[in-house]
Amino acid sequence: MKSATKLLLILMMMILAGCGDSLFSQAHIRVIAPDYMKPVFDRAAAQFYRENKIPVILVYKSPDSLLEKAKADFRSDIVFFPKPKKNDYLESDSLLNFATMSCPFKISTVFINRIEGPQVSELRDLKKNSIRRFVMIDPELSYEGDLCRRILEKHKVWDKIGDKLILARSSEHLLTYLETGEADAALAFEHSFAGYRNIVIKQRFDDYLGYRLHYCGLLLSHSRQKKSAQAFLDFFDSRLCRVYELPGVMRLE
């Protein structure tokens, strides 16, 4: 019996040793990211793991709580957030002021039209009777929806579309309205339409939203995996990063 137990222990030690740099000894990095950017970061984390064998744990939060979450979560290594106009508040923060910041990419917000539906040229055409329904994400549920509402208000359309407006719960919900033909047009982040072909882009609003669509990655000073975390930030700067194959996601020079 003792021999069998000893043999089992030896086998377990061999299995653990065989795992080497994979499951048991492998350090992971923890990344806090905006919840509306999930398709981008899921894709990046998967590619980074395939190429580097470093797991990335993604924690998705609403944009107004990203930095506070990063400061409170001492297991976190990186936080991504919309680029501020000024970095003064970062410089005055005792936790963040020694961190490494990167500004690797930006995203696009677009106004689209279904190819098979009534045609529009620009946002103000939404007021025409030919456009039956228009869909965007609910501003009360998503930062993406909030930015879209600002665009509509800026172009004096928000108060004019009345019963035409459909408020979706998510990007998936928004696409359902387009696929079924219940909506003729939509306003959303361009990457929300990834894989959907039955649309044509009518307008882009990157310039109007400006810095709100530029995203920074911040390597936190309390990170315990600084080398791996910096590698993840550098990965976003690489032209080989596949997130840039998503529509409307562009690497900043």
Image (cartoon, helix red, strand yellow):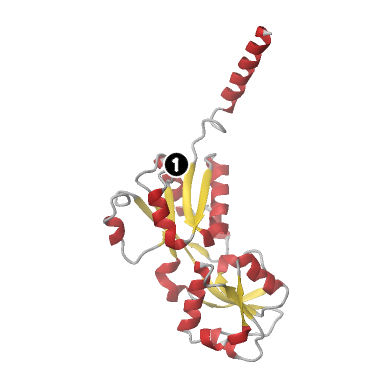
**In terms of image quadrants, where is residue 131?**
bottom right
Residue 232 is situated, as x and y percent measured from the top left of the image, at: 46, 47
Q: From the viewer's perspective, is 173 left or right of 63?
A: right
Q: Is residue 1 left or right of residue 76?
A: right
Q: Position of residue 101 (x, y in %)?
A: 36, 53
Residue sitting at 62 percent across and 20 percent down?
A: 12
89 vs 60, left or right, is left
Q: Nearer the viewer, residue 18 or 248?
A: 18
The spot of residue 30 in percent (x, y) is 47, 46
Farthest-out residue, left = 92
Q: Which residue is depicted at the point 28% across and 50% down? A: 94
Asked if residue 182 lies left or right of residue 191, the reply is right
Say which residue appears at 42% left-offset and 68% top-offset.
212
User: Which residue occupies the foreground of this view, 163 or 84?
Assistant: 163
Mark 1 surroundings within 10 Å by alpha-carbon count, few (fewer than 14), some (14 through 19), many (20 or more): some
Q: Position of residue 45 (x, y in %)?
A: 54, 49
- Quarter holding the N terminus is top right
Which amino acid is tagged 1?
Answer: Ser
Residue sticking out furthest to the bottom? 129
Task: Looking at the picture, tell me which residue is in the foreground, 240 or 64.
Answer: 64
Q: Which residue is mark 1?
A: 228
Q: Residue 114: name its quadrant.
A: bottom right
Q: Is residue 215 visible?
A: no
Q: Quadrant of the C terminus?
A: bottom left
